[in-house]
Image (cartoon, rainbow, N blue to C red):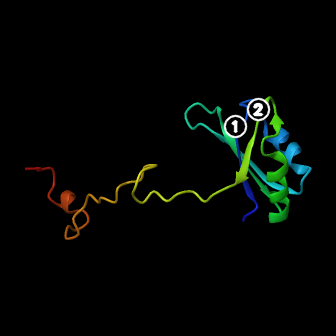
């Protein structure tokens, strides 16, 4: 187990300070990150809370999972590592395709001048 927790089902009005206050009663909170939407800047409804030790994070899971914060019953569990984007479903990635041939010399197009055909 690690000391980083996933906190889901959060109210969009919950702030980092409110989250820190709620979780600090179970130990030393070293980091709080509320995920925001890239385009709108609005909170996405989940966050990550990191504790100084695994024992503190385990206690926080037991006490805060299902607890009410800003009118919402929180979902709290151990944060899992981000999935790699190498194949099979899920998020994007570049696909691994390259657009240059290995035998082409750098600047070859410029050396031919303006003529393209």
Point 78% across, 53% down: residue: 31
Q: Quadrant of the N terminus?
A: bottom right
Q: Is residue 53 visible?
A: no
Q: Is residue 47 above or below residue 68?
A: below
Total labels: the figure holds: 2
Instruction: Looking at the image, tell me whether mark 1 or mark 2 is earlier in sequence order.
Output: 1
Label drawn at residue 9: 1
Q: Nearer the viewer, residue 53 or 16?
A: 53
Q: Quadrant of residue 97?
A: bottom left
Q: Residue 20, image x and y in percent? A: 84, 46
Q: Nearer the viewer, residue 8 or 35?
A: 8
The answer to whether 114 appears left or right of 86 in the picture is left
The answer to whether 26 appears left or right of 79 in the picture is right
Label drawn at residue 72: 2
Point 20% across, 67% down: residue: 104
Q: Residue 6, image x and y in percent? A: 70, 50
Q: Secondary structure at mark 1?
A: loop
Q: Residue furthest bottom?
A: 103
Q: Nearer the viewer, residue 117 or 60?
A: 60
Q: CA distance from mark 1 to mark 2?
A: 7 Å
Label drawn at residue 107: none
Callout 1 environment at 10 Å: few (<14), some (14 to 19), or many (20+)?
Answer: some
Q: Quadrant of residue 54?
A: bottom right
Q: Residue 28, image x and y in percent? A: 88, 57
Point 73% across, 32% down: residue: 11
């Amino acid at each position: 187990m690690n000391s980083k927790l996933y906190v889901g089902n959060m109210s969009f009005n919950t702030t980092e300070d409110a989250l820190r206050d709620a979780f600090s009663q179970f130990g030393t909170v070293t980091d709080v990150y509320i995920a925001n939407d890239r385009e709108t800047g609005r909170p996405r409804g989940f966050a990550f809370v990191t504790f100084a030790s695994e024992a503190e994070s385990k206690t926080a899971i037991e006490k805060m999972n299902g607890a009410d914060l800003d009118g919402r019953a929180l979902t709290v569990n151990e944060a899992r590592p981000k999935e790699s984007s190498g194949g099979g479903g899920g998020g994007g990635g570049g696909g691994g395709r390259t657009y240059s041939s290995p035998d082409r010399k750098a600047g070859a197009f410029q050396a031919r001048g303006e003529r393209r055909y």
